[in-house]
């Protein structure tokens, strides 16, 4: 009995092992997927139409067009396959044939993968006629992007072939040869734009020609097209802003302060998204990646700059909030701030007279804001770290020093140094307010992005709060409901203090640096910034032309637009950035621009000579310059 019992146990165990093996082979082994690709049944994967992209006014920006692809199942290619004849038919070299076949094999010998992509209809008709002769090959039809515009790749993005990591993350959807959003809204809204794949089954005759649908289409799975999206971008304003950045590097960000909708997002130099469509997309991408002007780098969201004098607004607001100055506090300027050997020169032109808040903002008095900042840091005389940390936390409440966690594909935190930061850098008790006084005028360790600056302007325009900047307005032409975007984010500054700052920003266009480009019928509030920057060449620090910065919002009593403009190496804030910002306001609010002379001047003034001169310096040092001033990290 014991022997019989052992026999039954062994028989049962063997049966279980065989059953498990059978289940594995049927459900998990690629080889058996071939049953849908036999000689009589054709399985066609239907790639859904990708959703279209529109601007806020429903102007079509991105659509689709159809192309054909040859697919291959490597295991079906036998030793009698006529490689020469096939290569002549599809017009490729033998080397290309074997290279593409190896790539397909590395993915799977049993599953179909793309062998030749981007075949135009005219060429495909000739191939399709004779394709039945070549066992292992088939075809499929897919849509690719058709960009109706020739710029703003930083917004729209582009699509590219999925990587192994993409397939690994979503192996139930992506297969080799599929496309996925690589940048811009194509990336951030990939799952909404891509839709859902379908399957069609066809009956083929012995020559491989399709003669009918299989099983009356009962086994077919319908593809679901991707959803359309409508951006918050005003395309007419976007194109106008791009023209103003003629042969200039930098960024422009325009936001509606009432809801956080991004109206314009210009990263210059711009590039054409159509370059990333078609057979030459890899070459074009490589060319742009090697371009010293770094056109693929989104300066609006990734570029980090010292905000310079535009940051003085926050210096004063923090001083008021922390109670170290009052609305009637004045300081006398003697051509700058002086403390021992430390000097910050001032060119405000007000020598030896008391200067108050609004005038200090209007004429950008360095001494005034240095004095305020010194009081902020020294609020707690025996604990400078506490004062610096309090300053840092208030500044961060404006959206600096952190990600927005919005729907943009890229973003940067920037740097807002705290007291703890300086303790690590210098050591506790080894720094004081004078050590870090450059922060008072937006220099020092402070680094911010153009979109963060524009968001700061929104918070000032709203007198204490902002909405998360975002770029999508509608999905399938219906307004989105996103609690994160609809909820106001409040700063740590009391509402009453903003009036003093705004009054000074208005005076910028009356007695300050914005007098020559004010708009007669629009009341604006603005501030210039002139940001110093340097590079290191052969161990020497070389000063480059300053970055031109300007921020503003308008109209003052009913803010509709908040703007930040940064022109790299553009000089004073009032030279280029200021006029550009005011022209954008005029275009947006009045719908047309009457200051044609100013418009023409800006649209024809380029800085290519400046950039060429910088480029002549040693390339490694220029790369170091970009690495130290900008960051390529993604959100």
Image (spheres, rainbow, N blue to C red):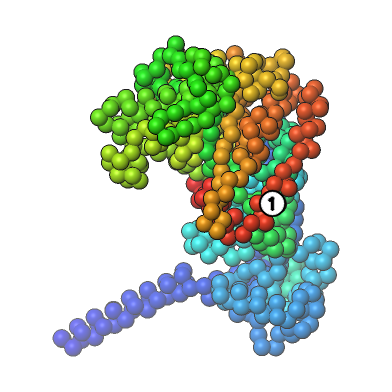
Closer to the camera, 235 or 435? Answer: 435
What residue is rendered at 71% in x and 85% in y? 81
Residue 333: percent from the left, percent from the top?
49, 21
Q: Does the image show residue 168?
A: yes
What residue is rendered at 79% in x and 74% in y? 91
Horizontal relation, residue 356 to residue 146: left or right: left
Closer to the camera, 47 or 57? Answer: 57
- How many numbered circles does the render carry? 1
What residue is rendered at 39% in x and 17% in y? 325
Residue 593: percent from the left, percent from the top?
78, 24
Packing grade of label 1 (10 A; few <14, some 14-19, many >=20) is few
Residue 468: percent from the left, percent from the top?
51, 32
Residue 319: percent from the left, percent from the top?
40, 22
Closer to the camera, 204 or 264? Answer: 264
Say which residue label 1 marks.
613
Position of residue 224 relative to residue 574, above or below, is below
What residue is rendered at 72% in x and 14% in y? 521
Q: Does the image show residue 390?
A: no
Tag 1's secondary structure? helix
Q: Which quarter of the picture shows residue 618? A: bottom right
Position of residue 359 relative to residue 186, above or below, is above
């Amino acid at each position: 009995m014991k022997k019989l019992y052992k026999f039954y146990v062994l028989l049962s165990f063997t049966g279980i092992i065989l059953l498990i093996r059978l289940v594995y082979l049927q459900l998990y082994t690629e080889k058996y997927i071939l049953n849908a690709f036999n000689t009589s049944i054709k399985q066609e994967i239907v790639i859904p139409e990708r959703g279209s992209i529109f601007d806020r006014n429903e102007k079509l920006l991105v659509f689709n067009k159809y192309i054909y692809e040859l697919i291959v199942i490597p295991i079906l290619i036998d030793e009698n396959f006529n490689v020469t004849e096939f290569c002549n038919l599809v017009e490729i070299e033998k080397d290309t044939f074997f290279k593409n076949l190896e790539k397909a094999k590395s993915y799977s010998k049993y599953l179909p993968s793309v062998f030749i992509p981007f075949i135009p209809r005219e060429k495909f008709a000739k191939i399709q006629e004779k394709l039945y002769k070549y066992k292992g090959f088939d075809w499929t039809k897919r849509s690719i992007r058709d960009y109706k515009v020739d710029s703003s790749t930083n917004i729209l993005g582009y699509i590219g072939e999925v990587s192994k990591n993409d397939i690994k993350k979503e192996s139930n959807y992506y297969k080799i040869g599929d496309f996925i959003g690589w940048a811009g809204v194509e990336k951030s809204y990939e799952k909404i734009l891509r839709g859902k794949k379908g399957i069609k089954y066809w009956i083929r005759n012995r020559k491989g020609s399709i003669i009918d649908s299989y099983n009356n289409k009962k086994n077919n799975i319908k593809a679901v097209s991707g959803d359309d999206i409508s951006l918050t971008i005003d395309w007419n304003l976007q194109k106008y802003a791009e023209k103003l950045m003629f042969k200039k590097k930098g960024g422009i960000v325009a936001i509606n302060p009432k809801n956080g909708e991004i109206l314009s997002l210009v990263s210059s130099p711009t590039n054409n998204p159509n370059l990333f469509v078609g057979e030459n997309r890899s070459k074009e991408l490589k060319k742009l990646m090697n371009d010293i002007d770094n056109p693929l780098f989104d300066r609006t969201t990734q570029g980090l700059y010292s905000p310079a004098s535009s940051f003085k607004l926050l210096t004063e607001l923090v001083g008021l909030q922390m109670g170290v100055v009052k609305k009637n506090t004045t300081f006398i300027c003697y051509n700058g701030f002086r403390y021992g050997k430390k000097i910050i020169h001032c060119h405000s032109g007000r020598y030896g007279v008391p200067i108050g808040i609004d005038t200090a903002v209007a004429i950008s008095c360095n001494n005034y804001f240095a004095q305020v900042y010194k009081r902020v840091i020294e609020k707690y005389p025996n604990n400078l770290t506490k004062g610096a940390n309090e300053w840092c936390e208030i500044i961060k409440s404006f959206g600096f020093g952190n990600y927005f966690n919005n729907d943009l594909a890229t973003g940067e935190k920037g740097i807002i140094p705290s007291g703890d930061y300086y303790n690590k850098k210098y050591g506790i008790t080894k720094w004081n307010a004078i050590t870090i006084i450059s922060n008072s005028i937006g220099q020092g360790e402070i680094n911010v992005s153009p979109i963060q600056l524009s968001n700061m302007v929104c918070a000032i325009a709203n007198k204490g709060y902002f909405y998360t900047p975002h770029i999508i307005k509608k999905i399938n032409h219906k307004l989105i409901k996103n609690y994160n975007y609809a909820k106001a984010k409040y700063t740590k500054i009391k509402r009453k203090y903003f009036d003093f700052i705004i009054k000074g920003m208005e005076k910028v266009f009356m007695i300050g640096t914005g007098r020559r480009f004010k708009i007669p019928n629009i009341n604006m509030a603005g501030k210039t910034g002139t940001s110093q920057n340097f590079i290191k060449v052969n161990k020497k620090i070389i000063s480059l032309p300053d970055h031109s910065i300007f921020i503003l919002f308008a109209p003052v009593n009913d803010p509709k637009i908040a703007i930040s403009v940064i022109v790299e190496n553009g000089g004073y804030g009032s030279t280029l950035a200021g006029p550009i910002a005011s022209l954008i306001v005029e275009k947006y609010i009045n719908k047309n621009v009457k200051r044609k002379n100013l418009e023409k001047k800006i649209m024809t003034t380029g800085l290519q000579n400046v950039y060429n001169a910088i480029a002549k310096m040693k390339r490694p040092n220029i790369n170091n310059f970009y690495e130290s001033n900008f960051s390529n990290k993604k959100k």
